[in-house]
Amino acid sequence: MKKVVAVVTGGAGFIGSHMVDLLAERGFEVRVIDNLAGGREANLAQHKANPDVTFRRGDIRALSPGDPLFDGARYVFHFAGIGDIVPSIERPLDYLSVNVLGTAHVLECARRARVAKFVYAASSSCYGLARTPTREDHPIAPQYPYALSKYQGEQAAFHWRKLYRLPVNSVRIFNAYGTRSRTSGAYGAVFGVFLRQKLAGRPFTVVGDGSQTRDFLYVTDVAEAFLSAAESDKEGEVWNLGAGKPQSVNRLVELLGGTAVHIPKRPGEPDCTWADIAKIGRDLGWSPKVSFEDGVARILAEIDYWRDAPLWDPDSIAAATAGWFQVLTPQSPP
Protein backbone atom coordinates (compact mmCIF):
# COMPACT_ATOMS: atom_id res chain seq x y z
CA MET A 1 0.00 0.00 0.00
CA LYS A 2 1.37 3.41 -0.98
CA LYS A 3 2.20 5.66 1.94
CA VAL A 4 0.77 9.13 2.34
CA VAL A 5 3.45 11.74 1.64
CA ALA A 6 3.95 14.71 3.97
CA VAL A 7 6.48 17.51 3.57
CA VAL A 8 7.81 19.19 6.73
CA THR A 9 9.70 22.46 6.28
CA GLY A 10 11.99 23.25 9.19
CA GLY A 11 11.79 19.55 10.02
CA ALA A 12 15.10 19.44 11.89
CA GLY A 13 14.04 22.27 14.19
CA PHE A 14 12.36 22.19 17.57
CA ILE A 15 8.70 21.63 16.68
CA GLY A 16 9.39 20.38 13.16
CA SER A 17 11.48 17.43 14.33
CA HIS A 18 8.71 16.32 16.68
CA MET A 19 6.29 16.62 13.75
CA VAL A 20 8.57 14.28 11.77
CA ASP A 21 8.60 11.84 14.70
CA LEU A 22 4.81 11.74 14.83
CA LEU A 23 4.38 11.35 11.07
CA ALA A 24 6.96 8.55 10.89
CA GLU A 25 5.28 6.81 13.81
CA ARG A 26 1.92 7.05 12.00
CA GLY A 27 3.32 5.46 8.83
CA PHE A 28 3.74 8.49 6.55
CA GLU A 29 6.45 8.98 3.96
CA VAL A 30 8.10 12.13 5.31
CA ARG A 31 10.21 14.58 3.34
CA VAL A 32 12.12 17.19 5.28
CA ILE A 33 13.80 20.42 4.26
CA ASP A 34 15.84 22.45 6.74
CA ASN A 35 18.83 24.79 6.50
CA LEU A 36 20.35 23.27 9.67
CA ALA A 37 21.08 26.68 11.20
CA GLY A 38 22.53 26.05 14.65
CA GLY A 39 23.58 22.48 13.84
CA ARG A 40 20.32 20.60 14.30
CA GLU A 41 21.21 17.35 12.52
CA ALA A 42 20.96 15.39 15.78
CA ASN A 43 17.24 16.12 15.99
CA LEU A 44 16.61 13.69 13.13
CA ALA A 45 19.24 11.10 14.11
CA GLN A 46 16.67 8.47 15.02
CA HIS A 47 15.34 8.53 11.44
CA LYS A 48 18.71 8.07 9.73
CA ALA A 49 18.03 4.44 8.82
CA ASN A 50 14.33 4.94 8.03
CA PRO A 51 13.80 4.83 4.25
CA ASP A 52 10.45 6.58 4.68
CA VAL A 53 12.13 9.74 6.04
CA THR A 54 14.25 11.70 3.59
CA PHE A 55 16.12 14.92 4.28
CA ARG A 56 17.35 17.82 2.20
CA ARG A 57 19.51 20.63 3.47
CA GLY A 58 18.39 23.88 1.91
CA ASP A 59 16.89 27.34 2.18
CA ILE A 60 13.13 27.53 1.55
CA ARG A 61 13.72 30.73 -0.43
CA ALA A 62 15.54 28.63 -3.05
CA LEU A 63 12.51 26.38 -3.66
CA SER A 64 10.82 26.64 -7.05
CA PRO A 65 7.40 25.44 -8.25
CA GLY A 66 7.68 21.86 -9.45
CA ASP A 67 10.38 20.95 -6.93
CA PRO A 68 10.37 17.12 -6.65
CA LEU A 69 10.37 17.37 -2.86
CA PHE A 70 6.64 18.07 -3.14
CA ASP A 71 5.76 15.46 -5.80
CA GLY A 72 2.73 13.48 -4.69
CA ALA A 73 2.54 15.19 -1.31
CA ARG A 74 -0.83 15.25 0.39
CA TYR A 75 0.15 17.51 3.30
CA VAL A 76 2.66 20.31 3.83
CA PHE A 77 3.51 21.36 7.38
CA HIS A 78 5.29 24.70 7.25
CA PHE A 79 7.49 25.33 10.30
CA ALA A 80 10.60 26.78 8.62
CA GLY A 81 11.47 30.32 9.61
CA ILE A 82 13.46 32.49 12.00
CA GLY A 83 12.04 31.97 15.48
CA ASP A 84 14.16 34.03 17.87
CA ILE A 85 12.14 37.09 18.84
CA VAL A 86 14.59 39.60 20.32
CA PRO A 87 16.99 39.77 17.32
CA SER A 88 14.12 40.71 15.02
CA ILE A 89 14.45 44.28 16.29
CA GLU A 90 17.96 44.45 14.82
CA ARG A 91 17.37 42.29 11.72
CA PRO A 92 13.85 43.01 10.42
CA LEU A 93 14.76 42.40 6.77
CA ASP A 94 16.02 38.89 7.51
CA TYR A 95 12.77 38.04 9.27
CA LEU A 96 10.58 39.39 6.49
CA SER A 97 12.69 37.63 3.87
CA VAL A 98 12.57 34.19 5.48
CA ASN A 99 9.20 34.25 7.21
CA VAL A 100 7.23 35.97 4.43
CA LEU A 101 9.07 35.49 1.13
CA GLY A 102 10.19 32.01 2.19
CA THR A 103 6.59 31.12 2.98
CA ALA A 104 5.54 32.30 -0.49
CA HIS A 105 8.08 29.95 -2.07
CA VAL A 106 6.69 27.00 -0.09
CA LEU A 107 3.13 28.00 -0.98
CA GLU A 108 3.96 28.03 -4.68
CA CYS A 109 5.47 24.55 -4.43
CA ALA A 110 2.42 23.29 -2.56
CA ARG A 111 0.10 24.87 -5.13
CA ARG A 112 1.92 23.31 -8.09
CA ALA A 113 1.86 19.91 -6.33
CA ARG A 114 -1.90 20.25 -5.65
CA VAL A 115 -1.53 19.26 -2.01
CA ALA A 116 -4.66 18.41 -0.04
CA LYS A 117 -3.76 20.63 2.92
CA PHE A 118 -1.18 23.28 3.78
CA VAL A 119 -0.85 23.81 7.54
CA TYR A 120 0.90 27.02 8.55
CA ALA A 121 2.70 27.38 11.89
CA ALA A 122 1.56 30.84 12.96
CA SER A 123 2.38 32.73 16.13
CA SER A 124 0.20 34.11 18.91
CA SER A 125 2.55 37.11 18.95
CA CYS A 126 0.34 38.56 16.21
CA TYR A 127 -2.13 39.59 18.95
CA GLY A 128 0.38 41.82 20.74
CA LEU A 129 -0.64 42.87 24.26
CA ALA A 130 -3.86 40.91 24.12
CA ARG A 131 -6.92 40.45 26.27
CA THR A 132 -6.96 37.02 27.90
CA PRO A 133 -8.03 34.37 27.36
CA THR A 134 -7.40 35.23 23.73
CA ARG A 135 -9.78 34.11 20.99
CA GLU A 136 -9.07 33.84 17.30
CA ASP A 137 -11.09 36.98 16.53
CA HIS A 138 -8.95 39.18 18.79
CA PRO A 139 -7.58 42.29 16.98
CA ILE A 140 -4.15 41.86 15.41
CA ALA A 141 -1.44 44.14 16.84
CA PRO A 142 2.13 42.86 16.28
CA GLN A 143 4.67 44.58 18.52
CA TYR A 144 7.96 43.66 16.79
CA PRO A 145 9.20 42.41 13.39
CA TYR A 146 9.10 38.71 14.29
CA ALA A 147 5.39 38.98 15.11
CA LEU A 148 4.74 41.01 11.96
CA SER A 149 6.59 38.56 9.72
CA LYS A 150 4.76 35.53 11.09
CA TYR A 151 1.41 37.23 10.63
CA GLN A 152 2.25 38.31 7.10
CA GLY A 153 3.25 34.73 6.33
CA GLU A 154 -0.18 33.65 7.52
CA GLN A 155 -1.81 36.32 5.36
CA ALA A 156 0.14 35.03 2.37
CA ALA A 157 -1.13 31.50 3.02
CA PHE A 158 -4.74 32.66 3.06
CA HIS A 159 -4.15 34.78 -0.03
CA TRP A 160 -2.99 31.63 -1.85
CA ARG A 161 -6.17 29.93 -0.61
CA LYS A 162 -8.38 32.73 -1.90
CA LEU A 163 -6.65 33.23 -5.23
CA TYR A 164 -5.41 29.75 -6.09
CA ARG A 165 -7.80 27.63 -3.99
CA LEU A 166 -4.96 26.03 -2.04
CA PRO A 167 -6.51 24.34 1.03
CA VAL A 168 -4.98 26.10 4.05
CA ASN A 169 -5.32 25.94 7.81
CA SER A 170 -3.31 28.05 10.26
CA VAL A 171 -2.42 27.19 13.84
CA ARG A 172 -1.35 30.08 16.08
CA ILE A 173 1.06 28.60 18.60
CA PHE A 174 1.29 30.25 21.99
CA ASN A 175 4.27 29.04 24.07
CA ALA A 176 5.57 25.68 22.89
CA TYR A 177 8.21 24.03 25.04
CA GLY A 178 9.87 20.65 25.24
CA THR A 179 12.94 18.65 24.30
CA ARG A 180 15.06 19.98 21.40
CA SER A 181 14.04 23.60 21.92
CA ARG A 182 16.46 26.09 20.41
CA THR A 183 20.07 26.35 21.55
CA SER A 184 21.13 29.00 19.02
CA GLY A 185 23.46 31.89 19.74
CA ALA A 186 20.58 34.38 19.92
CA TYR A 187 19.02 35.31 23.23
CA GLY A 188 15.72 33.52 23.02
CA ALA A 189 13.11 31.38 24.74
CA VAL A 190 13.10 31.07 28.49
CA PHE A 191 13.60 27.29 28.62
CA GLY A 192 16.84 27.29 26.63
CA VAL A 193 18.22 30.14 28.75
CA PHE A 194 17.26 28.55 32.08
CA LEU A 195 18.41 25.02 31.24
CA ARG A 196 21.92 26.15 30.32
CA GLN A 197 22.06 28.24 33.48
CA LYS A 198 21.01 25.23 35.55
CA LEU A 199 23.73 23.08 34.00
CA ALA A 200 26.29 25.77 34.88
CA GLY A 201 24.99 26.18 38.43
CA ARG A 202 24.10 29.82 37.74
CA PRO A 203 20.97 31.65 38.89
CA PHE A 204 18.03 31.87 36.53
CA THR A 205 17.67 35.31 34.92
CA VAL A 206 14.01 36.04 35.64
CA VAL A 207 12.50 38.96 33.75
CA GLY A 208 10.62 41.28 36.11
CA ASP A 209 9.27 39.70 39.27
CA GLY A 210 8.49 36.36 37.62
CA SER A 211 4.76 36.62 38.14
CA GLN A 212 4.15 36.91 34.39
CA THR A 213 2.41 33.84 32.99
CA ARG A 214 2.75 31.98 29.73
CA ASP A 215 0.48 29.40 28.12
CA PHE A 216 3.09 26.66 27.87
CA LEU A 217 2.17 23.67 25.69
CA TYR A 218 4.36 20.59 25.39
CA VAL A 219 5.73 20.02 21.91
CA THR A 220 4.23 16.57 21.31
CA ASP A 221 0.79 18.07 21.91
CA VAL A 222 1.65 20.73 19.31
CA ALA A 223 2.51 18.06 16.73
CA GLU A 224 -0.73 16.18 17.41
CA ALA A 225 -2.72 19.37 16.85
CA PHE A 226 -1.03 20.01 13.50
CA LEU A 227 -1.74 16.50 12.27
CA SER A 228 -5.38 16.93 13.28
CA ALA A 229 -5.48 20.24 11.38
CA ALA A 230 -4.19 18.48 8.25
CA GLU A 231 -6.44 15.44 8.42
CA SER A 232 -9.60 17.39 9.25
CA ASP A 233 -12.09 18.08 6.48
CA LYS A 234 -12.11 21.70 7.66
CA GLU A 235 -10.04 24.25 5.76
CA GLY A 236 -9.64 28.01 5.72
CA GLU A 237 -9.52 27.95 9.53
CA VAL A 238 -7.38 29.64 12.17
CA TRP A 239 -6.96 27.98 15.55
CA ASN A 240 -5.25 29.16 18.72
CA LEU A 241 -3.05 26.48 20.27
CA GLY A 242 -2.05 26.42 23.92
CA ALA A 243 -2.69 24.41 27.05
CA GLY A 244 -5.31 26.88 28.21
CA LYS A 245 -3.65 26.92 31.66
CA PRO A 246 -1.04 29.69 31.97
CA GLN A 247 1.94 29.02 34.24
CA SER A 248 4.11 31.63 35.92
CA VAL A 249 7.84 31.94 35.34
CA ASN A 250 8.21 31.58 39.11
CA ARG A 251 6.49 28.18 38.88
CA LEU A 252 8.95 27.17 36.19
CA VAL A 253 11.87 28.19 38.44
CA GLU A 254 10.34 26.12 41.24
CA LEU A 255 10.05 23.02 39.03
CA LEU A 256 13.57 23.40 37.60
CA GLY A 257 15.05 23.99 41.04
CA GLY A 258 17.53 26.79 41.63
CA THR A 259 17.97 30.41 42.59
CA ALA A 260 16.95 33.45 40.60
CA VAL A 261 18.26 36.90 39.77
CA HIS A 262 15.85 39.49 38.42
CA ILE A 263 16.41 41.58 35.30
CA PRO A 264 14.32 44.48 33.97
CA LYS A 265 10.92 43.78 32.51
CA ARG A 266 10.84 44.31 28.75
CA PRO A 267 8.41 46.69 27.04
CA GLY A 268 6.11 45.22 24.41
CA GLU A 269 5.85 41.85 26.15
CA PRO A 270 2.54 40.74 27.69
CA ASP A 271 2.10 39.96 31.36
CA CYS A 272 0.01 36.95 30.39
CA THR A 273 -0.44 34.77 27.33
CA TRP A 274 -3.49 32.55 27.48
CA ALA A 275 -5.06 30.77 24.53
CA ASP A 276 -8.79 30.28 24.37
CA ILE A 277 -8.69 26.72 22.98
CA ALA A 278 -12.45 26.18 22.77
CA LYS A 279 -12.47 26.40 18.96
CA ILE A 280 -9.69 23.88 18.30
CA GLY A 281 -11.25 21.52 20.82
CA ARG A 282 -14.65 21.86 19.21
CA ASP A 283 -13.47 21.65 15.59
CA LEU A 284 -10.74 19.03 15.85
CA GLY A 285 -11.51 17.19 19.08
CA TRP A 286 -7.99 18.10 20.22
CA SER A 287 -6.97 18.63 23.85
CA PRO A 288 -3.59 18.81 25.59
CA LYS A 289 -2.30 15.60 27.15
CA VAL A 290 1.01 16.52 28.83
CA SER A 291 0.82 18.43 32.12
CA PHE A 292 3.29 21.25 32.77
CA GLU A 293 4.90 19.29 35.58
CA ASP A 294 5.34 16.20 33.42
CA GLY A 295 6.65 18.27 30.52
CA VAL A 296 9.32 19.95 32.65
CA ALA A 297 10.32 16.54 34.04
CA ARG A 298 10.78 15.20 30.50
CA ILE A 299 13.04 18.13 29.67
CA LEU A 300 15.13 17.70 32.81
CA ALA A 301 15.64 14.04 31.91
CA GLU A 302 17.38 15.23 28.71
CA ILE A 303 19.01 18.40 30.03
CA ASP A 304 22.41 17.55 28.55
CA TYR A 305 21.02 18.60 25.16
CA TRP A 306 21.53 22.22 26.29
CA ARG A 307 25.13 21.77 27.55
CA ASP A 308 26.64 23.59 24.56
CA ALA A 309 24.01 26.34 24.43
CA PRO A 310 25.06 29.95 25.15
CA LEU A 311 25.30 30.81 28.83
CA TRP A 312 23.46 34.06 29.52
CA ASP A 313 23.85 36.39 32.50
CA PRO A 314 22.35 39.82 33.31
CA ASP A 315 25.12 41.71 31.53
CA SER A 316 25.05 39.73 28.30
CA ILE A 317 21.24 39.84 28.25
CA ALA A 318 21.31 43.61 28.75
CA ALA A 319 23.64 43.92 25.74
CA ALA A 320 21.51 41.60 23.60
CA THR A 321 18.28 43.43 24.42
CA ALA A 322 19.56 47.02 24.30
CA GLY A 323 17.99 47.60 20.88
CA TRP A 324 14.72 46.14 22.12
CA PHE A 325 14.53 48.66 24.98
CA GLN A 326 15.55 51.52 22.73
CA VAL A 327 12.85 50.82 20.14
CA LEU A 328 9.98 49.57 22.27
CA THR A 329 10.19 51.79 25.36
CA PRO A 330 7.32 54.30 25.12
CA GLN A 331 8.54 57.80 24.36
CA SER A 332 7.60 60.70 26.62
CA PRO A 333 5.65 63.46 24.85
CA PRO A 334 7.79 66.48 23.91
Image (tube, rainbow, N blue to C red):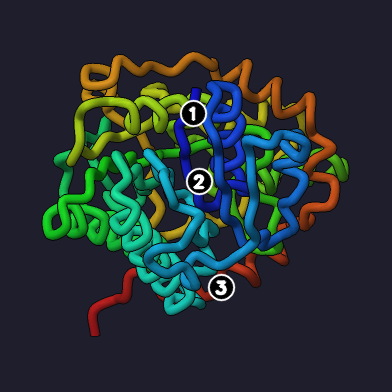
**Position of 72 compared to 50: left or right?**
left
- Whole-percent x, y for residue 274 in the image: 34, 32
- Whole-percent x, y for residue 317 in the image: 66, 62
Going by the numbered disc 1, the residue's amino acid type is Lys
Establish if 8 lies above or below 2.
Answer: below
Q: In the picture, residue 159 is in which quadrant?
A: bottom left
Q: Which residue is mark 3?
A: 322
Going by the numbered disc 2, the residue's amino acid type is Val
Could you give the CA–CA distance between mark 3 and mark 1, rounded to whole angstroms? 54 Å
Q: Nearer the viewer, residue 219 or 134?
A: 219
The structure residue drawn at horizontal position 55% and vertical position 24%, both measured from the top left corner, is 27
Q: Which residue is mark 2?
A: 8
Going by the numbered disc 3, the residue's amino acid type is Ala
The structure residue drawn at horizontal position 22% and vertical position 50%, both measured from the top left corner, is 166
Which of marks 1 and 3 precedes in the sequence? 1
- Label 2 with label 3: CB-CB less than 8 Å: no
Please, what secondary structure does the residue beneath circle 3 have?
Answer: helix
The structure residue drawn at horizontal position 74% and vertical position 50%, both measured from the top left corner, is 41
Please, what secondary structure does the residue beneath circle 1 have?
Answer: loop
